[in-house]
């Protein structure tokens, strides 16, 4: 799923000692106009008086005539809502920030909220850099063993948490947070995986919904390997859009056609399978196929990053993988000191308990072979990336239909050439929700709000502030 690119923050927080409808948040100043707190919630929501864990929360008070609070989530799963809120000026318009307290939170298992941990830094470097397109039994065996180690590491380091880290648990935490904030109904902006969190919330608490914007939607009805295949196709579409634009730029490293450029990229990836690119960062990491593929994927999330991708590919074709490696580090939240946030571990842990994956590695191999027919560059890589779920120590619960009967209108926004959450998913979620309203954007990149479309921004702001519901099927035009 999609990762949020955000700066690391240091957060001071104060703990509360109660949960439930009477919970209070003890706010303390944590710099730059923000206030921070901890909300105690049950580890197991079926045992509300049992063990508690802390959910880290941050607030930027409304600057004008306050309506209430707006909770925001950047996606992942595994991305920090605390960091996302710290960048509130790029997450929400000035008009929305004037009317709402901006509330960010790290969902359980993420960031500063009882984080899941699975692997050491060195082991994470090795895992992230794995060849995700195995073409020999030995390479498959390496993937299988690394995936087993990932799953067993999570069990060893975070075993008590793993069974209680799913999206439904986080949605119940969100309702406790809504109550602690004193809001009778929830106003929420969720992007990417945050759309799944919002949809599950609406399904569990339809009477507690005020306004939900679900931007760059995930289709919760699809089996996980079908989600992987659709996402891989989405990256292929985004790559073609990048290449079409690349030929209009003076610094495009390709000549000819999209087909010939794809052939050069394919050759580059195959080359790095056996011969890593140079790494001028001097941290000892070989820029093999895994890091190269991640570096290629990352700038596809944001059209504004396409110039960097042109530069990175130009360098890579000459043997230098440094810029691709820097891009890959952004996606997996690898820090300048070489350490990682727990984004990669939380992402895997939440995905593995949210959906029922095959337990036989051969099912992943078969799915990868099928996926490359429609997604020749990314199909195998995306499919094999979920392999640790085959060995996961906690079984996923049964997937329930999500339709949120009785909820007020819920706004679903989809971008036509979104690489990470294909537009078809937004269409599907809008139709699955009993009150879903679809807004499409003829654009590039991951998610639409505050991504350059005045049409999308206006519709979202009017809905959040005034509860003005757009017409279902509204389409916002291409920009630029």
Image: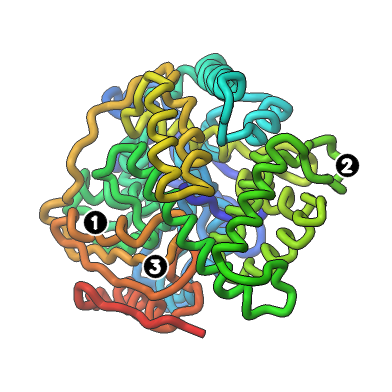
Q: Give the quarter of the image for residue 172.
A: top left
Q: Which residue is mark 1?
A: 428
Question: Measuring 56% from the left and 40% from the top, which residue is drawn there?
Answer: 343
Labels 2 and 1: the sequence-earlier one: 2
Q: Secondary structure at mark 2?
A: loop
Q: Position of residue 226 (x, y in %)?
A: 33, 41
Q: Is residue 71 above or below residue 125?
A: below
| Crowding at mark 1 (Cα within 10 Å: few <14, some 14-19, many 20+) | some
| Marks 1,3: beta carbons within 8 A | no
Numbered badge on residue 64:
none
Q: Is residue 150 visible?
A: no
Looking at the picture, tell me which residue is in the foreground, 101 or 203.
203
Q: Position of residue 282 (x, y in %)?
A: 88, 42
Labels 2 and 3: the sequence-earlier one: 2
| Crowding at mark 3 (Cα within 10 Å: few <14, some 14-19, many 20+) | many
Q: Position of residue 302 (x, y in %)?
A: 56, 65
Task: Tell me: 412 left or right of 444.
Answer: left
Question: Measuring 63% from the left and 24% from the top, which residue is drawn there?
Answer: 119
Numbered badge on residue 415:
3
Q: Which residue is mark 2?
A: 282
Q: Secondary structure at mark 1?
A: helix
Question: Measuring 37% from the left and 26% from the top, which residue is drawn there?
Answer: 363
| Marks 2,3: beta carbons within 8 A | no
Looking at the picture, tell me which residue is in the foreground, 293 or 409.
293
Q: Is residue 425 above or below residue 363?
A: below
Q: Is residue 94 above or below residue 176?
A: below
| Marks 2,1: beta carbons within 8 A | no
């Amino acid at each position: 799923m999609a990762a949020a690119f955000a700066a690391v923050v240091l957060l001071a927080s104060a703990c509360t000692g109660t949960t439930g409808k009477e919970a209070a948040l003890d706010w303390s100043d944590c710099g730059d106009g923000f206030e921070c707190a901890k909300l105690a919630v049950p580890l197991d929501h079926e045992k509300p008086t049992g063990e508690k864990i802390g959910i880290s929360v941050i607030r930027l008070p409304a600057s004008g005539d306050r309506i209430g609070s707006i909770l925001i989530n950047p996606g992942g799963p595994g991305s920090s809502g605390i960091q996302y809120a710290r960048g509130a000026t790029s997450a929400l318009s000035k008009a929305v920030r004037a009317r709402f307290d901006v509330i960010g939170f790290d969902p359980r298992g993420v960031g500063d909220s009882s984080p899941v941990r699975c692997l050491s830094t060195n082991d994470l470097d090795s895992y992230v850099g794995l060849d995700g397109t195995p073409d020999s039994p030995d390479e498959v065996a390496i993937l299988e063993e690394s995936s087993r180690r990932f799953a067993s590491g999570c069990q060893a380091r975070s075993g008590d948490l793993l069974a209680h880290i799913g999206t439904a648990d986080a949605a119940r935490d969100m309702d406790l947070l809504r109550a602690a904030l004193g809001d009778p109904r929830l106003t929420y902006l969720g992007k990417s995986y945050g759309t799944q969190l919002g949809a599950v919330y609406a399904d569990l608490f339809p009477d507690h919904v005020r306004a939900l914007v679900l931007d760059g939607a995930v289709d919760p009805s699809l089996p996980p390997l079908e989600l992987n295949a659709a996402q891989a196709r989405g990256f292929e579409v985004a790559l073609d859009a990048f290449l079409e634009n690349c030929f209009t730029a003076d610094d495009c490293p390709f000549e000819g056609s999209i087909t010939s450029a794809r052939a050069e990229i394919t050759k580059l990836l195959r080359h790095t399978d056996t011969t890593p690119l140079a790494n001028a960062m001097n941290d000892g990491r070989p820029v093999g196929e895994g890091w190269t593929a991640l570096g290629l994927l990352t700038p596809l999330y944001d059209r504004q990053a396409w110039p960097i991708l042109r530069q990175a590919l130009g360098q890579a074709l000459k043997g230098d993988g440094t810029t691709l490696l820097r891009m890959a580090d952004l996606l997996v939240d690898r820090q300048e000191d070489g350490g990682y946030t727990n984004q990669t571990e939380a992402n895997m842990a939440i995905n593995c308990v949210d959906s029922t994956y095959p337990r036989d590695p051969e099912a992943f191999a078969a799915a990868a072979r099928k996926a490359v027919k429609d997604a020749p560059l990314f199909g195998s890589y995306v499919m094999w990336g979920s392999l640790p779920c085959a060995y996961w120590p906690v079984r996923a619960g049964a997937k329930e239909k999500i339709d949120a009967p009785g909820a007020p209108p819920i706004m679903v926004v989809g971008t036509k050439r979104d690489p990470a959450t294909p537009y078809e998913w937004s269409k599907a979620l809008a139709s699955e929700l009993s009150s879903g309203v679809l807004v499409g954007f003829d654009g590039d990149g991951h998610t639409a709000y505050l991504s350059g479309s005045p049409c999308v921004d206006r519709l979202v702001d009017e809905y959040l502030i005034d509860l003005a519901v757009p017409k279902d099927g509204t389409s916002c035009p291409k920009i630029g």
